[in-house]
Image (spheres, helix red, strand yellow):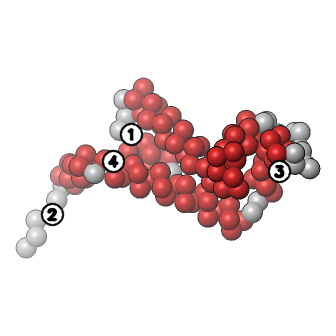
Amino acid sequence: MKKKRTLKELTSNLSKIIEKHKRKILIAYIVALVAFFSVQFILLQNWDMLVRIMNANFLFHHGYYFEDQRAPLEEILIGLLSFVLGSYAVFGYFALVTLIFVYSIYFFSKTFKADFFVILLLICNPY
C-alpha cells in the first residue's frame, strides 16, 4: 500500500525541484511569455499595437500616420529597436518588456520577502 504524502512533504519536494532548476524555469517562463505575446500579435493584429508601430515609423522612419493621444514611450522603444531589428522590432519590444516585467517582479518579491517563483505563478494566473 502506498503511503500518502503530507502537504508539507509535497511542498518540500517542489521547493527542492525549483531550487535545482531555477535558471531553466526562469528562461522557460520568459520564452513562454514572449512567445505568447508574439503569437497573440501575429494572430490578432490588434489596432493598438499596429498604431504603436505606425507611430514609431512616423517618429523614426518618415511614416505617414501618427495618433497623438498615446504616450510615446512604447513608440520610442519600438522605433529605437527598429534600427537594430528592422521589421521585427515589435518582437524585440515584447522581449524587452517581458525582461523588465520579470526584473520588477524579482525586486517586488525581494522587497516583500516572498518567493520569486510563487509570485511569478500568481501574477500569470489567468483567473
Looking at the rendered image, the quarter that the C terminus falls into is bottom right
Q: Distance between the residues labelled 3 and 2?
A: 59 Å
Identified by mark 3, the residue type is Met
- The image quarter containing residue 42 is bottom right
Q: What is the number of the mark on residue 54?
A: 3
Q: How far apart are marks 3 and 1 (CA)?
A: 36 Å
- Dot in front, 1 or 2: 1
Report the front residue among 105 and 78.
78
* Residue 115 visible in image: yes
Identify residue for label 4.
Answer: 23
Disc 1 residue type (three-letter): Phe
Q: Which residue is drawn at 48% across and 36% down?
A: 103
What secondary structure is found at the residue carrying circle 3?
A: helix
Q: Distance between the residues labelled 2 and 4?
A: 31 Å
Q: Which of marks 3 and 1 is nearer the N terminus?
A: 3
Relative to residue 99, is residue 27 depicted above or below? Answer: below
